[in-house]
Image: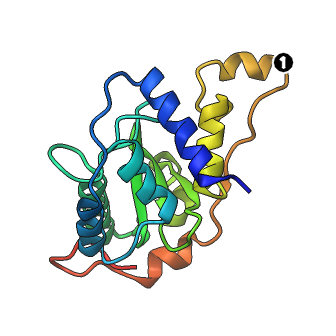
Amino acid sequence: MTDANDLLARVAAKAEASSGPLPPPASAEAVAQAERALGFALPSLLARLYREVADGGFGPDYLLLPLTGQGRTVLGEYASERASSAGEATPYWPAGVLPVLDWGCGMYAAVDCRGETGTVLLFDPNALDDDGADAWFVDAGDLATWLETWLAGTGWYREDDDEADDVGDATPDPMPWEAAAGRIAEDPPEPGRVGRA
């Protein structure tokens, strides 16, 4: 099991070395306000990332979104995706799943906030079919593993992945998230609220 304090220290060191000037960390009150607005708690490691490393601006490729504030934020993207999903004939965004990183082309890295370990999911709208669950994949069984993958430079998104394919060292594709269909169907968003879980 990964020691959270050690992991956060290594994440902070890599963030400072690779992401340029970081935004200040979110205050404990800002995290608590975000959780009240969402109607659910963040997994402890995710909350600590925002409180102890920075309020976004670090991580793989396009970097973690800030939790709150101006521009694109975790809360804003969650509210937007939940509202858009509810308006579709085929709903696609489950309650309690926070988009934390925009990969581009409508794809997100998202954290399942219903579990303490925070399963990291990949949302790929290009895979949407007759069922919104088709767009959801497990990227990592927990947030700590996902962060370790970033630290090691071994994620599926790494820039040299084409070279890795040539030598048989490619990371396997994410597997479908089996809980997606049930989670999408169980909890439509309430008007005027960011979300429930």
The residue at the point 68 percent across, 31 percent down is: 154
Query: Residue 21 at what x, y percent from top left?
Result: 31, 25
- Please, which residue is most extreme toward the right here? 168
The number of numbered discs placed on residues in the rendered structure image is 1
**Residue identified by numbered label 1:** 167
Secondary structure category for the residue under label 1: loop
Q: Residue at x 55, y 62 (%)?
A: 118
Residue found at x 50% / y 30%: 13
| Quadrant showing the C terminus | bottom left
**Pick the front one: 93 or 6:** 6
Q: Nearer the viewer, residue 113 or 2?
A: 2
- Of 125 and 109, which appears nearest the observer? 109
Left or right: where 9 falls relative to 3: left
Q: Is residue 18 above or below residue 41?
A: above
Q: Quadrant of the N terminus?
A: bottom right
Q: Which quadrant would residue 134 be assigned to in this image?
A: bottom right
Measured from the top left, where is residue 74 in percent x and y? Answer: 31, 53
Q: Which amino acid type corresponds to the residue marked 1 in the rendered image?
A: Val
Relative to residue 148, is residue 102 drawn left or right?
Answer: left
The colour style of the image is rainbow
Q: Position of residue 2 (x, y in %)?
A: 69, 52
Indicate the position of residue 17 as horizontal and vertical percent values. Answer: 47, 21
- The answer, for residue 87, to whether it is visible in the render is no
* Left or right of residue 138: residue 61: left
Taking the spot 67% from the left edge, 58% from the top edge, the residue there is 141
Q: Is residue 46 left or right of residue 160?
A: left
Q: Give the class, few, some or many, for how many residues have Cα within 10 Å of label 1's Cα (few <14, many ≥20).
A: few
Q: Is any part of residue 146 visible from this angle?
A: yes
